């Protein structure tokens, strides 16, 4: 569910003045655009109707794609309009375009929509719902469910060895919405390491016996296994049996109090799917970092705990808020701190609201669709009319007041009809 800026801009054009979307019927020239054929064309508009309006070439296959020009003249008899400034190239035949009679499509319409989203003028009425369960109680591994990928080639917080190609796979993850597809062309590894210093998580594991778990899919026997390296010693777990099914692998080792501890996948040449990696053991863990994208709103933030750690796809139930606190940190992050820590090895799901993605180019999108887009259009229209302009022409006070009043009425109606609710409340977990 998403809507592009180009679509929102077109909707705003329809809502605030004359708008037409057509397809050229001839190649035209750098000084003309022609649309005089087909069921819908420009022949139905009188001479001069589109003059001082704007044309935007929207067909990505046109050499003039993206051009916006003010219209100098329009001839009804030939369905031809001429721009004040030449197109970068002839628009071409059979190319889509849009006409705006009132507002400039980029300077006014695009920017009005960008401002509504970027300035969060409708938050929290419009928001993105987040459901994040990339945390496991007692685990110090980061991004163990492989949901976060700042780079398309490697999941966040993990290090890939040579001869390994990684992609984020959302077709059939074992847990959550994504897993890792790993294609190894030779013996290689995927790992995550901690330095055993006084400020690292690894120090909390020192001199404890720790178990590393991960779910792995493989159809090659004795090809992939887990390992832990600590104090210069590497301990390996059992191999996947290669039956073409998901299998939870594990390895256990005692962690040295100094140096580096590494948790990893040891792979031979093969294709694998990896998911839901975590470790347990060490001193009790009470604190977990809340993703920065989730806003902490009253009655719209929930923490849930997995019912059974052996079934990650199973049910979750809500933790009563009396059992945790949200602790802001000096670096801007926030910690979820449990008063009574849950047992190790259970997925922790954090649910809440976040801001919609910022819009930049025409192809960029926000995470809403109709009818919520009506709210964006209504707010953008109010903003345009509050500026007191009609394109590049000043509106008289009466016209401005009338159009602003209508836009504000539509906005109020849209807020009442299409405002989004906060995430639904789930049942409370009393298992404490």
Image (cartoon, rainbow, N blue to C red):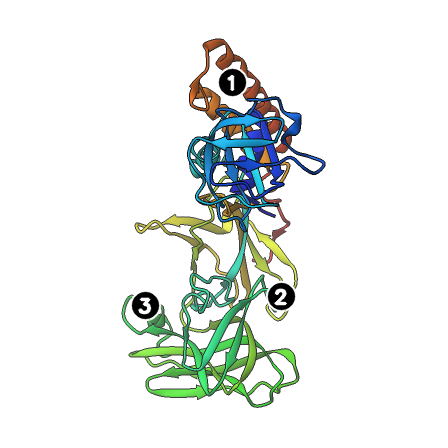
Label 1, label 3: how far apart the Cα atoms are: 57 Å
Labels 1 and 2 touching (C-beta < 8 A): no
Label 3, label 2: how far apart the Cα atoms are: 35 Å
In the image, residue 109 above or below residue 176 = above
Mark 2: few, some, or many residues within 10 Å (few <14, many ≥20)? few
Where in the figure is residue 108, as x and y percent of width and height? 45, 30
Q: Secondary structure at mark 3?
A: loop
Mark 3: few, some, or many residues within 10 Å (few <14, many ≥20)? few
Q: Secondary structure at mark 2?
A: loop
Q: Secondary structure at mark 1?
A: helix
Where in the figure is residue 232, as x and y percent of width and height? 33, 87
Location of the C terminus (image quadrant): bottom right
Q: Which quadrant holds residue 111?
A: top left
Where in the figure is residue 11, as x and y percent of width and height? 58, 34
Q: Earlier in the sequence, mark 1 or mark 3?
A: 3
Residue 404, labelled with which disc?
A: 1
Mark 1: few, some, or many residues within 10 Å (few <14, many ≥20)? many
> In this figure, which residue is indicated by the disc labeled 3?
200
Outermost residue toward the bottom in this view:
222
Q: Nearer the viewer, mark 1 or mark 2?
A: 1
Residue 171, labelled with which disc?
A: 2
Q: Is residue 419 visible?
A: no
Q: Is residue 399 visible?
A: yes
Q: Residue at x 47, y 25 (%)?
A: 384
Closest to the observer: 5 or 336?
Answer: 5
Outermost residue toward the left in this view:
198
Closest to the observer: 375 or 98?
Answer: 98
């Amino acid at each position: 569910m998403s809507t592009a800026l180009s679509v929102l801009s077109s909707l705003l054009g329809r809502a605030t003045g004359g708008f037409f979307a057509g397809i050229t019927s001839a190649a035209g020239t750098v000084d003309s655009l022609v649309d005089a054929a087909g069921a819908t064309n420009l022949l139905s508009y009188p001479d001069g109707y589109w003059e001082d309006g704007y044309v935007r070439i929207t067909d990505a296959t046109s050499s003039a794609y993206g051009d916006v020009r003010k219209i100098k003249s329009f001839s009804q008899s030939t369905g031809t309009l001429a721009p004040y400034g030449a197109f970068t190239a002839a628009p071409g035949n059979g190319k889509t375009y849009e006409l705006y009679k009132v507002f400039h499509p980029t300077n006014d319409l695009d920017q009005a929509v960008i401002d509504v989203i970027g300035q969060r003028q409708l938050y929290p009425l419009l928001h993105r719902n987040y459901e994040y369960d990339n945390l496991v109680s007692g685990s110090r591994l980061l991004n163990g469910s492989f949901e976060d990928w700042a780079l398309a080639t490697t999941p966040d917080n993990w290090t890939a060895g040579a001869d390994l190609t990684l992609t984020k796979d959302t077709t059939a993850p074992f847990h959550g919405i994504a897993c890792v597809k790993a294609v190894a062309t030779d013996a290689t590894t995927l790992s995550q390491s901690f330095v055993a210093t006084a400020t690292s998580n690894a120090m909390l594991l020192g001199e404890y016996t720790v178990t590393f778990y991960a779910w792995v899919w493989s159809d090659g026997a004795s090809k992939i296994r887990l390992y832990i390296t600590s104090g210069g010693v590497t301990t390996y777990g059992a191999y996947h049996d290669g039956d073409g099914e998901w299998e939870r692998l594990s390895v256990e080792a005692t962690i040295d109090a100094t140096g580096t501890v590494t948790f990893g996948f040891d792979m031979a040449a093969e294709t694998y799917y990896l998911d839901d990696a975590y470790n347990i053991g060490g001193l009790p863990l009470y604190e977990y970092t809340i993703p920065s994208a989730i806003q902490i709103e009253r009655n719209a933030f929930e923490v849930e705990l997995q019912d059974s750690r052996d079934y990650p796809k199973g049910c979750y139930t809500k933790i009563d808020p009396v059992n945790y606190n949200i602790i802001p940190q000096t670096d801007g992050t926030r910690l979820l701190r449990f008063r009574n820590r849950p047992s190790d090895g259970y997925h922790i799901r954090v649910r809440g609201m976040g801001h919609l993605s910022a819009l930049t180019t025409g192809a960029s999108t926000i995470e809403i669709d109709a009818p919520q887009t009506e709210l964006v259009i209504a707010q953008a229209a109010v903003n345009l009319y509050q500026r007191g302009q009609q394109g590049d022409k000043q509106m008289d006070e009466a016209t401005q007041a009338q159009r602003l009043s209508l836009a504000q009425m539509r906005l109020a109606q849209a807020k009442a009809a299409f405002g989004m609710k906060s995430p639904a409340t789930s049942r409370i977990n009393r298992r404490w």
